[in-house]
Amino acid sequence: MGRKTFRKIITSPELIEQINPENKKLMERFLKNYSTKKSPKTIINYRSNLNIFFCWNILEDGNTFYIDLKRMDFMDFFDYASIELQWSPNRFHQCHSCLSAFSTWIEKVMGEQYPNFRNLLPFIDKPDKEAVRKKSVFTQEEINELMSMLDEKGKTQQKCLLSLMTSSGARASELVRFRTDIIDENNTAYEGLFLETTEEIRIKGRGVNGKSALRYILKDTFLPNYHKWLVEREKIMKENNQDHTYIFIKSNGEPAELTTIKSWFVKWDIFTTKRFSKTFYPHSLRHMLVTKLLSIGVEKELIQSLLSWTTAEMVDIYSDLKPSERKWKSLGKLKSALEQDNIL
C-alpha cells in the first residue's frame, strides 16, 4: 500500500527517442563520466531527471539545444514541474541538483567548446524542503503486535527480519547483505550489549560503491528470533540443495532480493494500516530505534556510532522524541534544589 503521492509521467520511449541529438550526446557523455564517480543508483536517478527535462524541452520549448537555454527556460520548467507535475520541494531539489551538476560539468569539461556557457541553475530559487507525507511513529507495543501476528502465521523469517530492523536500524537495501558468517555471538561491543558484524556491510554513501561499515545489533532482542529462524532456514536450504550464507532467503532457498523483502513490507503495511491507521515503511523502524535510545538517555554520539553516521545531527533528524520526553541530567539538580527549597 505505502504512502501515496501524486504522479504524472511526461516521458515515454518514443519521446526520449526524439530528444535533440546534441542534447542526447551531452547527456550520455555526462552520465558516462559521472558513472566513474557516483553510484549506479545515482546515475539512474540522474538519467531519469534529465529525460524528464529533455522531454519537457520537446513538449514546451522546441527541443532547444541545452547550451542555448536561458534563465527563463529553466524557470518555466520548474514552474511546470511545481504546477503540472505537482513536485514536492524535495523532488524539486533533487532535479535542480541534477541539472546543476550537469551544467557545471559542461562548464568545466567543455569550456573550450562552449566558452560562453554558464550554469544558470543558481539563479533558480528553490522552495524550502518540507515533509509532504504523514510520518508514521510506531510504539513498541504496536511493533510487538506486528511481531505477534507474524508469529501466529508462522512467518519465522519475516519476524527475524523485523527483529533485525528494530535492533539495528539497518536500511532495507542493507538487510539482504546480512550473512550467517558475519554474525558471531561472541563478537560483541559496547559492554556486550550489541553484536558487531565481523565484516563491514556496504551501506549508503557517496561514490561508485558507496561506503562500508560495521553493523551493530541489540543482542538480546535479535538472537531469540535469529536462532528460531536458523532452524527453519537450514531445512529449506537442504531441501533445495542450496549452499550460501545469506540469512534471508526465498522459498526455493536462493538469497532473498530487495524485491522479496519489499513484498513482505507490503503485507506488514496492510496490517499496520488496518490495525493502527499507520503506514508501514522501513525508515519508520529506524526512527523508532533512535527515539527509543534517546528516551532512555543514550548519548547522541553513541547513537551516531551505532548507526555509522558521519555527524550527530542525523540523530535529531531521526528522533521523534519531544523535548519533554528526553532524559535531562540537569533535572536532577533542579529536583535537589527544590527539595532544599533553594530556588525562587
Image: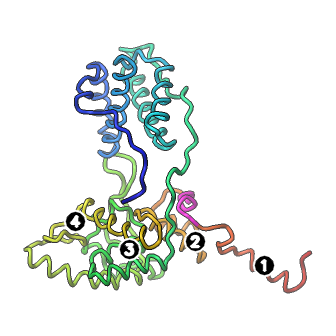
Residue mark closest to the camera, 4 vs 1:
4
Quadrant the C terminus occupies: bottom right
Q: CA distance from mark 3 to mark 4?
A: 22 Å
Q: Is residue 315 magenta?
A: yes
Helix, strand or loop at disc 2?
Answer: helix
Q: Are marks 4 and 2 in contact (CB under 8 Å)?
A: no
The residue stretch that appears in magenta: 312-320
Q: Dot 3: few (<14), some (14–19), or many (≥20) neighbours within 10 Å?
A: many
Mark 3 belongs to which amino acid? Glu
Residue mark closest to the camera, 3 vs 4:
4
Q: Is residue 255 magenta?
A: no
The residue that mark 1 highlights is 333
The residue that mark 4 highlights is 256
Question: Where residue 334 sits in the image (x, y, percent)?
Answer: 80, 77
The colouring scheme, among rainbow, by chain, secondary structure or one colour, is rainbow
Question: Where residue 92 sits in the image (x, y, percent)?
Answer: 48, 38
The residue that mark 3 highlights is 196
Q: Compared with residue 307, is residue 97 higher up or lower down, i.e. above or below?
A: above
